Image (spheres, rainbow, N blue to C red):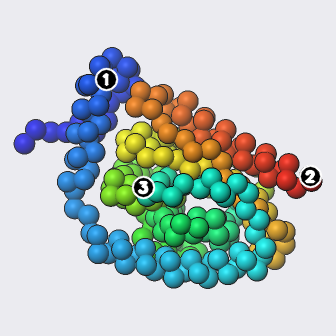
Amino acid sequence: MESVILRISHKKKLSMTDEELGQYYSNMRQHYLSLPFDVKSTEKAEKHYRFFSRIFNLIAIIKRTKMLKEEFLPNEEGLIFVSNHIGSYDQFYIDRLIRKYNYSPHYLVKEKVMKFFLRWNLIYKHVGVVVVNQESIKSWQSAEKKLIKYLLHKKSVFIFPEATRRGENNIGEFKTGVAKIAQKTGSKIVTMAIKNTKKFFIGKPIICLGDIIEVGEREDIIKATDRIKNAVLNAYSNIIDYEKR
């Protein structure tokens, strides 16, 4: 059986014809689609997510979560959702927005969160999260494969590109993983920004939908990552402007 090349350099992509590059992506995606994928367990996990989603939504309603530009949320599957990351309650309020079309995204979660935050562990182990050890290249490669498989099977995923909680008013460096996965799968990236989510009993959470981004097949990953971050920053600026009114 002919081996499939899963990674090539940006320089190599630039040297390929459109036909060659298209064939490369087609072969790579077919390879991931040929790997084992447990549809039954995935659907069960998404069913559990929708159950917990009702609880999250109730909390978001009680907190009077404000949603901006929600009308631009696309109604399609196989999306990559991204946002800045403030605190451990972010998902409560994010879910208020994405449940509009009954999305059940598979979150990328740090391994240490599963180990040290029991309250999340009890939920996450039932809702199909993808766990990654940030200090292990092998762990990231395994997580990336799972995320790609979800997306190619038209399941949505959620990734915090900062890869850590940054607190309020402090959006940090974005990792390149989101852009790489979007380029490999051809998936759209739905950007958003959140604010006032760090303290559970203080502040009114606000979520603003940002631009929908597609990463070109020849696009430089660093530049694509900058576009993703700028979209989140612009959405965050929209929240600041709303608060000033």
In the rendered structure, which amino acid carries the disc numbered 1?
Answer: Asp
**Residue at horizontal 42 percent and vertical 39 percent from the top:** 183
**Residue at horizontal 48 percent and vertical 28 percent from the top:** 220
Mark 2 or mark 3: which comes first in sequence? 3
Q: CA distance from mark 2 to mark 3?
A: 35 Å
Q: Nearer the viewer, residue 146 or 73?
A: 73
Q: Residue 41, position in %: x, y?
A: 32, 75
Q: How many marks?
A: 3
**Residue at horizontal 84 percent and vertical 50 percent from the top:** 240
Quarter of the figure that contains the N terminus: top left
Q: Is residue 19 above or below residue 184?
A: above
Cβ atoms at labels 2 and 3 below 8 Å apart:
no
Q: Is residue 35 left or right of residue 104?
A: left
Q: Which residue is mark 3?
A: 78
Q: Which residue is mark 2?
A: 244
Q: Which residue is mark 1?
A: 18
Q: Is residue 169 visible?
A: no
In the rendered structure, which amino acid carries the disc numbered 3?
Answer: Gly
Residue farthest to the top, as pictured: 15
